[in-house]
Image (cartoon, rainbow, N blue to C red):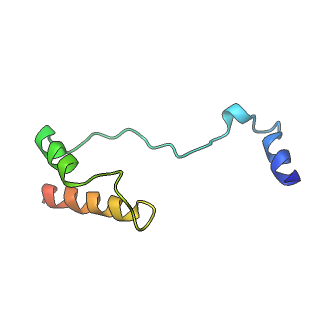
Amino acid sequence: MEDLNILVQDSTYPLEEQNVGVVVPQVECLLSENEMAQLRTTINPVSQSRDFGQDIYLSVSNFVQQLLE
């Protein structure tokens, strides 16, 4: 626990400047509004996951690949 306190109190990296999550850059969506609607009705992003969301991610990735072929 002492190591954690040292990390949090480190003045080299003030707490407000530390990265506390994943930063995902904005990208242009390649899907039309109709294709996005189809994706939303096909895959539920908050459904039960067997693999911490990896299975949902792969389902979306496969769905988009099929649309773009």
x then y, percent, for residue 24: 45, 44
Quadrant position of the C terminus in the picture: bottom left
Task: Give the vertical position of 36 relative to 58 (above or below).
Answer: above
Q: Residue at x 19, y 54 (%)?
A: 42
Q: Residue at x 34, y 59 (%)?
A: 57
Task: Give the vertical position of 49 relative to 32 (above or below).
Answer: below
Q: Residue furthest right?
A: 2
Residue 31, by quadrant, is: top left
**Front in this rendered view, residue 1 or 21:** 1
x then y, percent, for residue 52: 45, 62
Q: In screen coordinates, is 16 left or right of 40?
A: right
Residue 61, by quadrant, is: bottom left
Residue 49, by quadrant, is: bottom left
Q: Residue at x 28, y 52 (%)?
A: 44
Q: Residue at x 33, y 41 (%)?
A: 27
Q: In screen coordinates, is 52 left or right of 21?
A: left
Q: Residue furthest top?
A: 16
